[in-house]
Image (cartoon, rainbow, N blue to C red):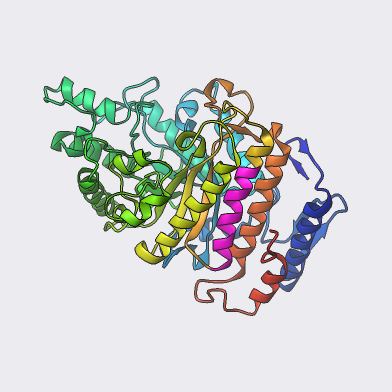
Amino acid sequence: MQCFGVSFQCHGYLQEMLLLSLAFLMVFFENLGTNVVIGFNGNYEHHSPHFSTSQGIYDMEDVEDDGWQMVETKGNQFIVNGQPFYVNGFNTYWLMVMAADQSTRGKVSEVFQQASSVGLTVCRTWAFNDGQWRALQKSPSVYDEEVFKALDFVVSEAKKYKIRLILSLVNNWDAYGGKPQYVKWGKAAGLNLTSDDEFFSHPTLRSYYKAHVKAVLNRVNTFTNITYKDDPTIFAWELMNEPRCTSDPSGDTLQSWIAEMAVYVKSLDAKHLVEIGVEGFYGPSAPARAQFNPNSYATQVGTDFIRNHQTLGVDFASVHIYADSWISQTISDAHLQFTTTWMEAHIEDAEKYVGMPVIFAEFGVSSKDPGYNSSFRDALISTVYKTVLNSTKKGGSGAGSLLWQLFPEGMDNMDDGYAIVLAKAPSTLNLISLHSSKLAIFNSMCSWKCHWGCKKKNALGTIIYHDDL
């Protein structure tokens, strides 16, 4: 397979399974009057008005403008234009700040092109940078127009590569400003603030946040002339990256903030999905689920997965997975066991208690961890993908996952240890690409009304339902 200059061969069992999948696709597309050519080296190409190979082998033409519609939810699944939409995606947080400089703007296009070439369809990135280097929001409601134009570019460029965006609206942490910067602004305005957590409770700081939300949602893109709140390129709004409120372990303070802000976003934009951005820790409302938390501290950070996601205006659940941060930094098989258990618990909760899809919105392992090697990273990615697919097979709530994080070459200065550079990681590229192909079959097979009840399900069972996949 050839992807942006990286050649590799699939050998043995993997090649057999890939070719079986491609054979299934060939039969499927033949029924649509489509020819699929499979080469002996594992490459394949499509000859059909329904496909385009200009941006990558998974670039389906159902994303022409008339099919580029809003992502919605129905039950515990995402749908687009009535079809299931299972997500294989990634995080690249720095897109806006790199796009703000013409000398680095090309990195945005580069990472989208590479992501598209392996079938990644959703990117999560920041729609905030508060009071920092290349700040979007220099002070409350005061914006740098050039940086806003950079975000416009990111949105327009994503659509070119048929990638949808989850845009996060503020950070819990001090990177890119976040809630500490809002508190600094409040203090500068004369407010008597003693904790960064007052971001969640002080009415003035809440008003600062709401003003930022309004500015972003009502922004008219200078490249496309489409208002953000009307743009299907945006998959969802994320209220905050990894909110925590350790000053109130009961969870009441954060819950009040989530309830207010979810409804506020919906009041401005009823079309787009909304998610919170929490890491998935269980809190006081579900003591029996606390056993699944990675440590005892996780119950004290003010988040409460089930309660938070029963909030009006929240459309899907988010969960992060960082065994190397939460359990132990040293790599071990216990990380993989935790990952499976953590994911299965949240998929079950999404189905039984909150009735919505769940996306595992960040997962990865740092190359700085003791005992790290690329084989372990691949094992972690495979574990996540397999757990998602096990849910997908059943039409369950496991709706997708987003790698943390995808980088092009030449961005080492931004690497937190978790960066995946596909050009340097052919085995990882192979895993991502194969998972994309599996999800693409589910996304193209049946409409929501079918719910796996059509006769095509048996054909799926022959290939994708194989336990070893």
| Chief SS of the magenta region | helix
Identify the image quadrant of residue 217: top left
Q: Is residue 346 above or below residue 35?
A: above
Q: Residue at x 35, y 62 (%)?
A: 354
The vertical placement of 172 against 289, above or below, is: above
Q: Could you say where residue 344 lies in the image, as x and y percent from the top left?
A: 49, 57
Position in image of residue 53 (x %, y %):
71, 50
Q: Is residue 255 left or right of residue 110?
A: left
64 in the magenta segment: no
Tell which of 208 and 402 is nearer to you.
402
Decide if residue 34 is in sight here.
no
Which quadrant of the rendered structure holds the N terminus? top right
**In the image, is residue 388 part of the stretch drawn in magenta?**
yes
Instruction: Please name the residue shown 62% across and 23% down the image.
Output: 410
Residue at 31% x, 38% y: name it. Answer: 244
Q: Is residue 54 above or below residue 148?
A: below
From the image, which quarter does the C terminus lie in? bottom right
Q: Is residue 240 visible?
A: yes
Viewer-nearest residue: 128 or 347 = 347
Residue 375: x percent and y percent?
Answer: 69, 38
Quadrant assignment, res 96:
top left
Please give the range of residues in magenta.
379-394
- Tally of numbered tags: 0
Q: From the viewer's perspective, is 300 left or right of 466?
A: left
* Farthest-out residue, right: 40
Residue 121, position in %: x, y? 56, 49
